[in-house]
Image (cartoon, helix red, strand yellow):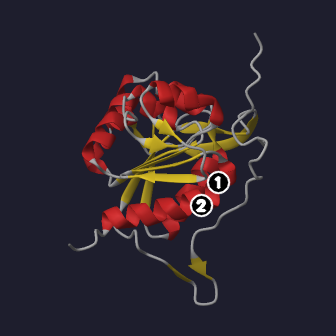
Amino acid sequence: MQSTEKGCGQALPGVPTARVVQPATREGSRTMTQELRGMRVGILATDGVERVELDQPRGALQGAGAKTEIVSLHPGEIQARQFDLNAAGTFPVDRLVADASVDDYHALLLPGGTMNPDQLRMDRDAVQFVKDFMASGKPVASICHGPWTLVEADAVRGRRLTSWPSIRTDLRNAGAEVVDQEVVVDGQLVTSRSPADLPAFCAAVVEQFARAHHPMPG
């Protein structure tokens, strides 16, 4: 049977077209916000990752002073996609998930793209890495199809979140409360629906990661 699912990033009725979001900067003075200075963020992704869902949050994190590493299933490079269908270049892998530990990072980013989390959720090391991260209480952000790996890690039960529409039944079946909002924050977890939500997603990720990095007194 031929799939009728739209690719990640393709337009859905009632969902606006994606806009480009840039890291927070002030061009005149060449200064950047640095609220994430000293923070190390792991980006768990593999072949089929939706390029814009990795590029833009990573740019926002780096613009706020964080260091990022791409953690993956195999060494070398991972193949990125646009709308799931079109080749969109590659990303170099910094570390294998089999060699990574939650202790290596302060926060975790899970971008989407249909094939990307579909492979991650079949890998024991990747699932355990995500499960351990959620258990640690450290901040985790995921967009589009990214929460599929959270389902496999049994990490959405009792959580309020959002995602690409086609995986919402999986989220509900795993015990999540699913809502249709551009960005949802539930404790340590930040989620968004699609690339159209990237401006709100990137802003929320930086804000929530900064709160975890610099907790408010009292």
Q: Is residue 192 left or right of residue 149?
A: right
Residue 64 vs residue 170, the one in the foreground: 170
Q: Is residue 2 above or below residue 60?
A: above
Residue 77 vs residue 132, the one in the foreground: 132
What label sits on residue 197 in the rendered view? 1
Q: Residue at x 61, y 48 (%)?
A: 53
Q: Is residue 34 left or right of residue 105?
A: right
Residue 150 vs residue 158, the one in the foreground: 158
Mark 2 — residue?
200
Q: Is residue 212 visible?
A: yes
The quarter of the rendered structure image containing the N terminus is top right
Disc 1 + disc 2, Cβ < 8 Å: yes
Could you tell me residue 143's position as x and y percent? 56, 45
Q: Secondary structure at mark 1?
A: helix
Could you tell me residue 209's position as x and y percent? 40, 61
Outermost residue on the left side: it is 218
Q: Residue at x 47, y 35 (%)?
A: 75
Q: Is residue 40 above or below residue 131?
A: below
What label sits on residue 122 in the rendered view? none
User: Mark 1 is on which residue type?
Assistant: Asp
